[in-house]
Amino acid sequence: MIDKKEALKQIKADNFKLEDADDKLKADKEVVLAAVKQDGTAIYYTDKKLKGDKEVVLAAVKQDGSALEYADEKFKADKEVVLSAVKQDVSALAYADEKLKADKEFMLAAVKQIPKGKKRKFRITVNEFRAEGGELVIGTVSVEFVKYWQERDDLIEHLESITDGKEGDANSPPMCDGKNFSWQECDDIEHILSPYRPSAEDGFKVEEITAKGAVINEKQVTDAVTVYSRERYASQINIDDENPDNDVSLLISLRGERGFDEASSWLVETDGEDFNSKKLAYGILKTAVGEFIDSVYYDKKELVVDDEGGTEGTVHRVAQVGVTKSSWIKNHSKTNVLKTVDWWEYDELLKEKSS
């Protein structure tokens, strides 16, 4: 074992780990201060009494903000200590006292501590516990299939039977080209797994997260702008005139899912600035079986959905058949709708919110 003098010498030479020291050195304030100024997380190995010493804790978090995790609990509610930790590493907010994080004035001060140009990451989700939505599949089928099933009630059972490798209704015409297949494969028009459009009361939840995924603060956004809506509807076949303008026969299927608030999200990264809720917007896909989030934007840039999986199927199932116009399908495809998105209303509302 080395003595105090030798320990201080080796710390200065960056050749000493507090974890290897004896209990006497771990309780020596001078040695501990020297050690945490070299490596803030070394506070983990210090004597319990020194973890409650503000001078030691401040020295540690100023060297490494994450050292706040190992400090005495009282310092996680100490504004000076937490702000010092955040200034060194914004991730330290994850270890701050919950009451402190709920203090808006403090959070504004904390955000100001973040160095300009330092990347910040935000996660956007639907602000609803166990948020519901579904797997929506739309595809073309034969006219005969539509005629047979548009007045019958057991289409879902028929589709499930086929998916399970069984025949289903023996009298039913084949789905397409003389064949039957899983309803999930009938997706040449649409196939999405998405939450329902959020209500005006719930809106979206925006969480700031660390590189390790820890949440350090959150906010609710209820006034995100809807920049477009596109539609996928079908009509029944009129047996008398065969609906000559409706030249595409459709099968629309939905399997209910829940848990989108945890399974699906959109990520935004900024160059140090806070998330601006005024820049959040989204597009909607409207169908007879529900309205779904089609896309999410931040500052006019479409965000890629981070689909972590893990949604849970519900008993909710819907299936319907009908006909529509091929021109309607083309004009309301996401690709074509995005070409004509008018950001005028978004820009005007952004000005209003900023004034």
Image (cartoon, grey):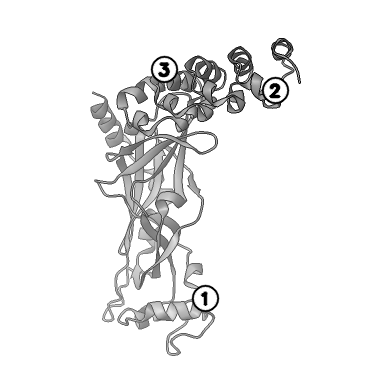
Mark with earlier residue (3, 1): 3
Q: Which residue is mark 1?
A: 181
Residue 123 to residue 6: above or below: below
Could you say which is closer to the camera, residue 290 or residue 41?
41
Q: Amino acid at mark 3?
A: Glu
Mark 3 or 2, closer to the camera: 2
Residue furthest out toward the front: 24
Residue at horizontal 63%, vertical 14%? 31
Mark 2 or 1, closer to the camera: 2
Residue at horizontal 43%, vertical 29%? 96
Mark with earlier residue (3, 2): 2
Mark with earlier residue (2, 1): 2
Which quadrant, please, contains the N terminus?
top right
Residue at horizontal 62%, vertical 20%? 39
Q: Which residue is mark 3?
A: 80
Q: In what element is the residue under mark 1?
A: loop
Q: Which residue is mark 2?
A: 17
Residue 332 to residue 267: above or below: below
Q: How crowded is the residue under tag 1: few (<14 C-alpha within 10 Å), some, or many (20+)?
A: some
Tag 3 near tag 1, CB within 8 Å: no
Q: Can residue 333 be seen from the camera position used here?
A: no
Q: In what element is the residue under mark 3?
A: helix
Could you say which is closer to the camera, residue 341 or residue 170?
170
Tag 3 near tag 2, CB within 8 Å: no
